[in-house]
Each structure stands twice: as C-alpha cells, then as structure tokens.
Image: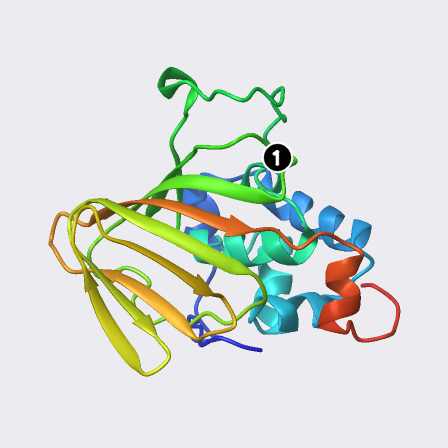
C-alpha cells in the first residue's frame, strides 16, 4: 500500500519550511505517537504511503506535513489530526458548535474539526484549494465519506473519474486508489468523514517491520 509523493530535491535547504511552519507541535507529536503505537519508522512510513526519509524529516521538523499526510498518519496511529497537532482534547460532547471550530491550515488545505475526539470516526470540514494535492494518490485501509458543500470536486477512484457538484456525496473503500482535486479557482469545501485505525490492531493488520524504533 503506497501513494505517490512529490518531495523537494535532496539538495534543497529546509530552513524556509521551518521558518514558515505554522505547526510547531506536530514534529514531537509524530514521533511520540509512532512510538506509542510500537511502530518502527519504516513500518509507519510504509503504512502511511511515505518514504522513511520523508517521515523522518516530518518528525524532526524539517518538513511541514500536508493535511493528507496528517490524515494518513492519524489513521495509522489510531488517533486524530487534532492530537497529531498537539491540540488538547476537548470533552466528548455530542454537539460541536460552529463558534468552537477553529480553522487549522496544513499543506495549503484548511480544515475544521466537525466531530468529537476519541471516536471510531473523524469528521472534518475541509477546504481544498485549486491545484493542491491533486496528484497524490491514496491507498489505505478503512472507509471514507465526503459531501460537497461548495465548489466542484474531481474524485478519482481507481480508473474512474467522477465530477461532484454541491450536494453530491461519495462513500468508498479506502483501499481503492483515490485522489481528489478542486475544479474551480476558488477551491472546494467538503464535509469529510473517515474511519480511524486503532492501535495495536492497526499495527497487526499493516504488518510492521520488526526491529528497534529509531
């Protein structure tokens, strides 16, 4: 299970990323949660569709993760994007008020938590800008459901491309290779729900590589 990632050439300096990084808490959280899940760097990277070198740079703060990367790692570690970002877990209220939804930016995407933490699913409201992440293919265990609120979405599932307009939804097995992209210059806004893999079951299903954790 893997996905294509576009990385900066190895000779490029990462200092600009660090200087502009709005997610200072994510690097130590990524390493801590990986170790809590008893996954090696190689096993976690493989399960999330990243290279070990890329994940290492995320854990050391040399590279800023995009929202799709955070979603993939959250699934692998059986947690939420909010916990990856070091946010304090709120009470598990059944109702989430619009005024309490703080926007968070990651890799050009913007998302708002639309569900309670520590649940079997994670619900997000997501803004995907035009031209962002459309070339990244995702493959991972679980299910995803999305609903277009505003704008038009191009959804690729396997060899089929779907055009979704406001009011349209999609519900699919995440093992189907998939990618999404905004069709309009103003981007697209979605409601997005995905299942979380819970450790250590996730580690067993994904077959972590034996060995010491770095």
Residue visible at 80% across and 56% down? 200
Q: Nearer the viewer, residue 5 or 140?
A: 140
* 24 relative position to 37: left or right: left
Q: Nearer the viewer, residue 120 or 39?
A: 120
Whether residue 157 appears in this view of the structure is: yes
Task: Confirm whether residue 108 shows in the render.
Answer: no
Residue furthest to the bottom? 159
Q: Percent x, y for residue 116?
A: 55, 30
Task: Where is residue 75? Give x, y as percent.
Answer: 61, 55
Q: Is residue 34 left or right of residue 58?
A: right
**Tag 1 secondary structure:** loop
Nearer to the camera, 93 or 6: 93
> Looking at the image, is 213 positioned above or below residue 2?
above
Location of residue 163 (image quadrant): bottom left
Crowding at dot 1, Cα within 10 Å, few <14 / some 14-19 / many 20+, comes out as some
Residue drawn at x 50%, y 32% is: 115
Q: Which residue is mark 1?
A: 86
Quarter of image, res 213: bottom right
Q: Give the image's coloring scheme.
A: rainbow
Q: How many marks?
A: 1
Q: Is residue 169 above or below residue 117?
A: below
Q: Position of residue 119 (x, y in %)?
A: 63, 38
Q: What residue lies at 20% left-to-right and 46% top-to-bottom?
A: 167
Note whether 79 is above or below 163 in the view shown: above
The relative height of residue 146 versus residue 207 in the rendered view (above or below) is above
For the C terminus, which image quadrant?
A: bottom right
Name, please, the residue furthest toward the left.
185
Residue 72 lies in quadrant: bottom right
């Amino acid at each position: 299970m893997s996905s294509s990632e576009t990385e900066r050439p190895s000779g490029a300096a990462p200092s600009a990323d660090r200087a502009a990084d709005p997610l200072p808490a994510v690097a130590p959280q990524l390493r801590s949660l990986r170790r809590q899940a008893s996954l090696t760097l190689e096993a976690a990277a493989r399960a999330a569709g990243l290279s070990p070198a890329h994940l290492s740079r995320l854990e050391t703060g040399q590279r800023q993760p995009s929202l799709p990367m955070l979603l993939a790692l959250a699934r692998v570690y059986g947690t939420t994007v909010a916990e990856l970002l070091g946010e304090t877990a709120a009470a598990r209220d059944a109702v989430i008020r619009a005024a309490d939804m703080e926007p968070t930016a990651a890799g050009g995407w913007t998302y708002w938590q639309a569900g309670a933490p520590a649940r079997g699913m994670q619900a997000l409201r997501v803004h995907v800008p035009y031209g962002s992440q459309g070339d990244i293919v995702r493959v991972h265990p679980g299910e995803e459901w999305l609903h277009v609120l505003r704008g038009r979405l191009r959804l690729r599932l396997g060899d089929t491309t779907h055009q979704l307009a406001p009011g349209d939804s999609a519900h699919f097995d995440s093992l189907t290779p998939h990618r999404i992209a905004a069709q309009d210059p103003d981007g697209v806004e979605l409601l997005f729900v995905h299942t979380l893999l819970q450790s250590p079951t996730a580690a067993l299903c994904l077959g972590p590589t034996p060995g010491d954790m770095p």
